Image (spheres, rainbow, N blue to C red):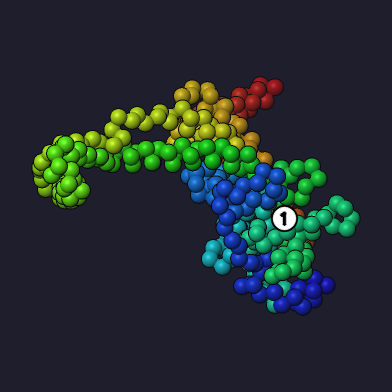
């Protein structure tokens, strides 16, 4: 076959995929609303807001696993065995690890790129999740297709074998090549939330960690005014030793008019519950995860929770539809490299968001429905 000659001439090594490069890390304040790609910003958002990071991992886990079904059972067993044991990134195994990282990248950046890595003989040997910072998307000469390019030092060149690259984009804008991250629109909200958290820390440091103002007022006599500086230094030294005595109880004795006041003791810390919840509501609304699944016990009825679970199920199914072409491309390439002519169907595991009682009740209803249908057929 021609593909083996082409792949053999590539001499592609497992440890050297064609889309590898290191990347820098920027600050949250570098956010530019009109920029197309803000990869470093999105990484910092996940690090700054733990609930956002937890929501993305929750979506990845809830998307669930899958299996490949073929017409030939022996081919199906061989394909599933390969998908279960294929090397991923050098330190993981199994296509589910590859798809999990691919989906996490897709949710974070809106664009995800994966690569099929072959050995020098053109055999399918590994899967690789490319760093999005190493990739640049360009429009092809036909004005419709997308060309995946890799950044190589000072130049950007198209990948040598585009048939080995799997590209996924999430909700791309009209006329755009890159997808849209689920965190789009959150930098402004997150910046406000970080200011609130930072202010809470500063206020607690000021009020909780009590500081004292020790004031020494010299008298009107000449001697007291002449030695005011020396007495002030002595008061400061004695007060410092008294405060640094640790667990030991130590009295502070001073001569003259000395007053001591706690700094910040009269201040009142602002109630941050309402503004923090308002910001978190905006963040969680973007992820589509019900609040109770993230440990936020906000007021909600049982019916509301059930409706939120139904909405989340539809969101997960949409993510599955985006991932299916990538999985099918990997399976079809395995068919070609093994000389097999077959078709693959991806069967996803059921999304289970309800508790065991609800699942048992649903199974009971299905069994009763089948029994009633069978009784109607027998009566006919």
Q: Name the residue under label 1.
A: 167
Residue 82, by quadrant, is: bottom right
171 relative to 312 in the view: left or right: right
Up-down: is 284 above or below 46?
Answer: above
Q: Which residue lies furthest to the right in this view?
A: 142
Determine which quarter of the picture holds residue 181: top right
Left or right, residue 200 beside residue 307: left
Res 265 seen here? yes
Instruction: Judge left or right: residue 202 versus residue 186.
Output: left
Q: Where is residue 175 in the image (x, y as percent from the top left)?
A: 81, 45
Q: Quadrant of the C terminus?
A: top right
- Left or right: 238 with respect to 337? left
Whether 259 is drawn above or below 134: the answer is above
Crowdedness of circle 1 by 10 Å Cα count: few (<14), some, many (20+)?
some
Seen from the viewer's position, the closer of residues 206 and 16 is 206
The residue positioned 48% from the left and 24% from the top of the image is 300
Q: Can residue 73 be seen in this view?
A: no
Image mark count: 1
Residue at image position (52%, 42%) is: 52
Which residue is pictured at 67% across the width and 25% down the height?
377
Instruction: Tell me what residue is drawn at x 59 percent, y 61 percent.
Output: 24
- Find the residue positioned furthest to the front: 222
Q: In this view, does 378 lie above or below 181?
A: above
Q: Where is residue 147 in the image (x, y as percent from the top left)?
A: 79, 59
Residue nearer the viewer, 158 or 321: 158
Q: Which percent across, then down, holds residue 308?
A: 56, 30
Residue 179 image position (x, y, % from top left) = 71, 47
Q: Is mark 1 on a helix, strand or loop?
A: strand
Q: Quadrant of the N terminus?
A: bottom right
């Amino acid at each position: 076959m021609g593909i083996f000659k082409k792949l053999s001439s590539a001499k592609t090594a497992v440890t050297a995929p064609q889309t590898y490069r290191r990347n820098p890390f920027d600050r949250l304040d570098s956010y530019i609303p009109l920029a197309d790609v803000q990869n470093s910003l999105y990484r910092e958002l996940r690090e700054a807001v733990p609930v956002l990071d937890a929501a993305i991992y929750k979506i990845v886990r809830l998307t669930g696993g899958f299996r490949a079904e073929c017409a030939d059972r022996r081919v199906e067993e061989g394909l599933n065995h390969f998908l279960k044991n294929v090397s991923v990134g050098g330190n993981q195994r199994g296509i589910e690890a590859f798809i999990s990282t691919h989906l996490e990248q897709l949710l974070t950046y809106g664009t995800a790129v994966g690569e099929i890595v072959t050995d020098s003989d053109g055999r399918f040997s590994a899967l690789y999740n490319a760093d999005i910072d190493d990739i640049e998307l360009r429009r092809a000469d036909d004005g419709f297709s997308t060309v995946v390019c890799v950044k190589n030092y000072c130049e950007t060149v198209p990948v040598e074998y585009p048939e080995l690259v799997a590209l996924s984009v999430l909700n791309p804008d009209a006329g755009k090549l890159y997808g849209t991250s689920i965190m789009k629109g959150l930098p402004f909200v997150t910046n406000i939330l970080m200011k609130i958290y930072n202010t809470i820390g500063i206020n607690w440091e000021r009020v909780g960690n009590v500081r004292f103002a020790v004031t020494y007022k010299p008298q009107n006599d000449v001697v007291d005014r002449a030695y005011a500086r020396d007495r002030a230094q002595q008061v400061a030294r004695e007060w410092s030793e008294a405060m640094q005595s640790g667990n030991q109880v130590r009295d502070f004795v001073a001569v003259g008019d000395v007053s001591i006041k706690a700094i910040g003791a009269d201040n009142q810390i602002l109630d941050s519950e309402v503004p923090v919840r308002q910001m978190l509501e905006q963040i969680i609304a973007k992820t589509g995860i019900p609040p109770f699944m993230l440990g936020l016990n906000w007021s909600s009825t049982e019916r509301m929770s059930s409706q939120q679970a139904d909405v989340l199920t539809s969101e997960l199914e949409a993510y599955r539809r985006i991932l299916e072409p990538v999985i099918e491309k990997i399976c079809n390439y395995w068919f070609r490299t093994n000389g097999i002519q077959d078709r693959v169907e991806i069967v996803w595991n059921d999304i289970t968001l309800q508790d065991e009682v609800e699942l048992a009740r649903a199974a009971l209803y299905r069994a009763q429905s089948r029994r009633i249908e069978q009784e109607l057929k027998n009566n006919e």
